[in-house]
Image (spheres, helix red, strand yellow):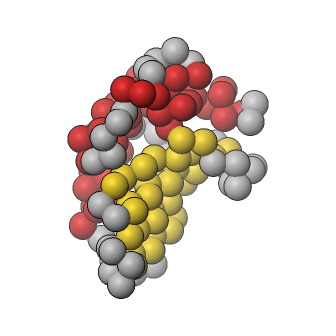
Amino acid sequence: MSSQTKLSKKITAVLKDLFPGHKFKLSFQEHQPEHFGNEIIEYEFEDFLMYMIKDRNELFVELAPKNSPNKHSQLPKLLESIGAAKASDFTEHDFKSVTNQLELLSRNFPKIQNGLNIL
């Protein structure tokens, strides 16, 4: 894998801070400077995959079970499904919003894992 992009370095630092007891690794990244700087970053956790998607300077977080990687779910909708937040709370698609979503994910990790297992 090529060296980490600026965004993947920032996201990795946040994940290390929020998930100190969980193993994860950066498993894929693609930066497309010719397409508005779009990026896809994939992290592999024990039971699920996390995708960071940068589309024209907007950031989105999606999760998928490892056994069904094509069944992506937006993190705000997953947080809403377990009662941790309303998806409408996340109208901004910037780094601060993603960090807030990841913080809620870390506090509700077992519930999110269970939710992904039933997808």
Spot occupied by residue 92 in the image (x, y as percentages of width and height): 30, 40
The quadrant holding residue 12 is: bottom left
Q: Is residue 100 above or below residue 45?
A: above
Q: Is residue 44 above or below residue 6?
A: above
Instruction: Identify the residue at the far bottom of this view.
Output: 34
Q: Is residue 13 left or right of residue 109?
A: left
Q: Quadrant of the C terminus?
A: top right
Q: Residue at x 60, y 42 (%)?
A: 73
Q: Residue at x 36, y 33 (%)?
A: 90
Q: How many marks?
A: 0
Q: Nearer the viewer, residue 20 or 114?
A: 114
Q: Residue at x 33, y 80 (%)?
A: 33
Q: Nearer the viewer, residue 3 or 40?
A: 40
Would residue 71 be visible to someone looking at this image? yes
Q: Residue at x 35, y 36 (%)?
A: 91
Q: Is residue 65 left or right of residue 29?
A: right
